[in-house]
Each structure stands twice: as structure tokens, then as C-alpha cells.
């Protein structure tokens, strides 16, 4: 569950209206499966733009097992394709704004600034061309965002759809100016190892005076953006659509980049909480650079909120305020990128001991039981991985 209490959609809509906000209609449907209802909605509403967020949103969840991998592909790719196909079949000139991810570029060191979507290249024979930046997905979730990009290119060329793809960094912050008007409007604060971002996880651990668990060396560099800026960038994208015939518009929706260990140190200095490095459940480079261009949004007048100006508010008003709702066990890794990462995490994260081998085995067994979370089949697989 979210650390922050989330009200039902009907309660949230009523709360918004009570603040003086305009009425918002809500239609519940599965975009990935209910194509005809989606098409009918477009035809009835005749929107100028569609903002497409309807995708499974977590890389760790997508790596949990074969079922979550298949669900992520089915839900995300089918949902995006249904939106595009419905826009074409409706016959309407609808601008599609899609929430993508910086993860399409991968998290290795690129050797230079990552441009906004496209790179200029010289092909064999001296031919000049502009192509999509090479894609290096680091999870099934990120792979779906890469597949979305390919669909966008096809529907732009084949059906002249107007599309904007927002390559967003990690979102932090829980409230926008609008949601602070009524506590019933507060946004989610996920802190678990599957859906919680690294920043939320650190904030929750600090609020409980639990060591900040840094994966590996902490040298992974990530991009960040405040939720208020996410909302602002979406508005700017809707207000500045590509013209008919223009290439798919791509914005890098990020405000700043930080190494994970730097982030942990910032929060440690702010709260006094200690830092602990643990084995990394992800299959990724232990160190990487991330230099990202974001000049397009800046040219539209965007001035972002940064961690140094807004982080303390998040610590005091969210993590500490709702800490009694936290289940600290959920912060520990529960999804592993492959069997090798699972085995190494089970081994490296075992508590060191100078006791007998019997006691060492008992400690390992306790760790495996913790990682399995009561799932007997998962416990058996963990034991087998340890043996191998």
C-alpha cells in the first residue's frame, strides 16, 4: 500500500470539486483490453489531446517472474497500440502525449550528452540521417517503452499522427500545488522495493532511523524530477504540440542527475541516518555517467524544482508524518534481474559471522526465508540457487 492514504476515485473527484476545481469526469476501463470502449470514448469526447499514462510502471516488478514479465509486455504494448489504433480509426486529429522513461537510453556510460531522442549520423556511403538514439533497455519494463517508441515512429509515418514522447526521470515529491488544497488529494508515496523509487525508499528508511540501503557501490547515476514539474512539463507538451508532418517530438523530462550514493549522503547528512551498501539485485553497471540534454523544456520557460530546495519538505511532511503506516520489510529487495543476481544477493547480504558453519547455515536460511516472504515455492528456488 501507499505510505500516504489514498482515497477512492469518487472521493478524490469530490474533494477536487470542493476546492473550487472544475468538474472532472471519470471512466473506468482497461485500455489494453477494451478497445471498442476506448474508440467510442474518443469519438464521443473528440479530445484535442490524449495523455497516455496507462502502463505498468515498475522495472523491478517487471523482473519479478515470468508472469509479471508477460503481464508487463501485454499490458504496456497492447495499451499503447490500442491508443494509437483508436486515434487513427476515430478519424480525429488527436495529439498523443506519452509518458516514457529515460531508461530507454540505458544506464551505461554513453560517452557524452544524451540528446533529446534523436542523433545525427553518417551512414555508409556518406549519407546523412537523423535516427532514434540507440535503445538499451535494462528491464522488461524499459523494453516496453522502447517498443512504444517504434510504434510511434510507424504511426507517425504511416498515419501522420502527432505524437510527443516524454522521456522522464525518477519522479520525487508527493504533492502539487493543486493536491495541497485538500489532504484527500494527496498522491501515492510508494516505498517498497518493487514500486518505490530509490529516493522514496531512502526517505522512508531515514524516517524510521533504518540504514539507507544502497545497491552495490551506489555509483549508478539517475535523473530526477519533482512531481510538480512533471505536471508542468505535461502541460507544456500539450500546449506545444508538433505540427502535422513533424517528426515524433521527444523531450527529456528531467531536472537534475545524481549518483545513488550521493543521494544517500544528502539524506544521511539531513537526517543523521547511516548508510549501508548491500548486494545489487539489478543487472546493471556498478558505475555510470548520465549527462542529459533538456533544453527543449527550458526554452519553453520551465524552471525546475531541485532536490536541494524541496527535499526537506518531503522528509518532514510526508515520510515522517505517515511513518506509522510503513512496513519496513517491504523496503528490502524482493525482485531480482536473473538467477545470478538472486544467488549473489542471498550470499552477499547474509550477515557475516565467525560462528560455526551450523550457525552460518542458520543465518543463511533466515535470510532466504525473509526473501521468500512466506512463499514456499520461492523459498525452494532460493535454496536451490544457493546450492548452485
Image (spheres, rainbow, N blue to C red):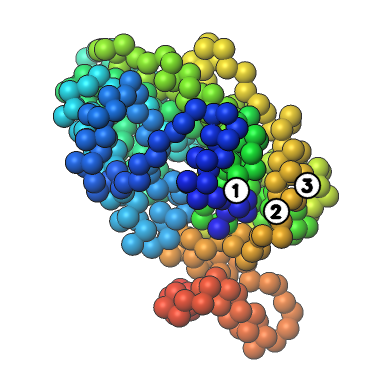
**Label 3 near label 2: C-beta < 8 Å?**
no
| Image position of 248 (left or right of 234) | left
The residue at which mark 3 appears reads as 268
The residue at which mark 1 appears reads as 189
Spatial CA distance of label 2 from label 1 is 10 Å
Q: Callout 2 environment at 10 Å: few (<14), some (14 to 19), or many (20+)?
A: some
**Label 1 near label 2: C-beta < 8 Å?**
yes
Q: Is residue 111 visible?
A: no
The residue at which mark 2 appears reads as 322
Helix, strand or loop status at disc 1: loop
The residue sitting at 47% across, 54% down in the picture is: 60
Q: Callout 3 environment at 10 Å: few (<14), some (14 to 19), or many (20+)?
A: some
Q: Nearer the viewer, mark 2 or mark 3?
A: 2
Quadrant in the rendering for residue 95: top left
The residue sitting at 22% across, 29% down in the picture is: 43
The label number, if any, that marks residue 257 in the structure image: none
Q: Is residue 314 above or below residue 327?
A: above
Helix, strand or loop status at disc 2: loop
Q: Is residue 371 visible?
A: yes
The residue sitting at 79% across, 52% down in the picture is: 273
For marks 3 and 1, the one nearer the N-term is 1
Image spot of residue 57 (x, y percent)? 44, 46
Q: Nearer the viewer, mark 3 or mark 1?
A: 1
For marks 2 and 1, the one nearer the N-term is 1
Spatial CA distance of label 2 from label 3 is 19 Å
Front-most of residues 326 and 58: 326
Helix, strand or loop status at disc 3: helix
Q: Callout 1 environment at 10 Å: few (<14), some (14 to 19), or many (20+)?
A: many
Amino acid at each position: 500500500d501507499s505510505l500516504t492514504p489514498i482515497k477512492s476515485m469518487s472521493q478524490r473527484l469530490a474533494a477536487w470539486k470542493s476546492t473550487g476545481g472544475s468538474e472532472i469526469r471519470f471512466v473506468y476501463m482497461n485500455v489494453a483490453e477494451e478497445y471498442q470502449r476506448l474508440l467510442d470514448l474518443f469519438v464521443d469526447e473528440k479530445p484535442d489531446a490524449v495523455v497516455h499514462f496507462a502502463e505498468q510502471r515498475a522495472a523491478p516488478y517487471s523482473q519479478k517472474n515470468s508472469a509479471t514479465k508477460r503481464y508487463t509486455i501485454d499490458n504496456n504494448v497492447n495499451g499503447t497500440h490500442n491508443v494509437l489504433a483508436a486515434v487513427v480509426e476515430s478519424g480525429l486529429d488527436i495529439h498523443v502525449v506519452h509518458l516514457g522513461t529515460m531508461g530507454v537510453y540505458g544506464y551505461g556510460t554513453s560517452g557524452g550528452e544524451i540528446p533529446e531522442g534523436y542523433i545525427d549520423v553518417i551512414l555508409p556511403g556518406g549519407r546523412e540521417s537523423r535516427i532514434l538514439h540507440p535503445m538499451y533497455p535494462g528491464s522488461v519494463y524499459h523494453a516496453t517503452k522502447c517498443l512504444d517508441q517504434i510504434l510511434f515512429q510507424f504511426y507517425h509515418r504511416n498515419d501522420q499522427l502527432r505524437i510527443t514522447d516524454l522521456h522522464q526521470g525518477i519522479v520525487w515529491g508527493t504533492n502539487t500545488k493543486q493536491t495541497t488544497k485538500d489532504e484527500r488529494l494527496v498522491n501515492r508515496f510508494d516505498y517498497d522495493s518493487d514500486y518505490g523509487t530509490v529516493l522514496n525508499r531512502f526517505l522512508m528508511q531515514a524516517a524510521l532511523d533504518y540504514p539507507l540501503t544502497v545497491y552495490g557501490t551506489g555509483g549508478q547515476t539517475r535523473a530526477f524530477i519533482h512531481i510538480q514539474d512533471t505536471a508542468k512539463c505535461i502541460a507544456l507538451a500539450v500546449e506545444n504540440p508538433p505540427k502535422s508532418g513533424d517528426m515524433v517530438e521527444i523531450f527529456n523530462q528531467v531536472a537534475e542527475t545524481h549518483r545513488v550514493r550521493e543521494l544517500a549522503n544528502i539524506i544521511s547528512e539531513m537526517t543523521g541516518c547511516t548508510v549501508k551498501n548491500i548486494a545489487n539485485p539489478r543487472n546493471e553497471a556498478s558505475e555510470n555517467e548520465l549527462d542529459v540534454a533538456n533544453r527543449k523544456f527550458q526554452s519553453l520557460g520551465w524552471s525546475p524544482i531541485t532536490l536541494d530546495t524541496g527535499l526537506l519538505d518531503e522528509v518532514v511532511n510526508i515520510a515522517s508524518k505517515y511513518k506509522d503506516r510503513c512496513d519496513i520489510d517491504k523496503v528490502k529487495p524482493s525482485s531480482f534481474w536473473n538467477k545470478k543476481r538472486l544467488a549473489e544477493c542471498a550470499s552477499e547480504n547474509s550477515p557475516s559471522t565467525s560462528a560455526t558453519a551450523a550457525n552460518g547455515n542458520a543465518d543463511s536460511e533466515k535470510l532466504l526465508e525473509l526473501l521468500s516472504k512466506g512463499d514456499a515455492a520461492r523459498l525452494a528456488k532460493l535454496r536451490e540457487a544457493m546450492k548452485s
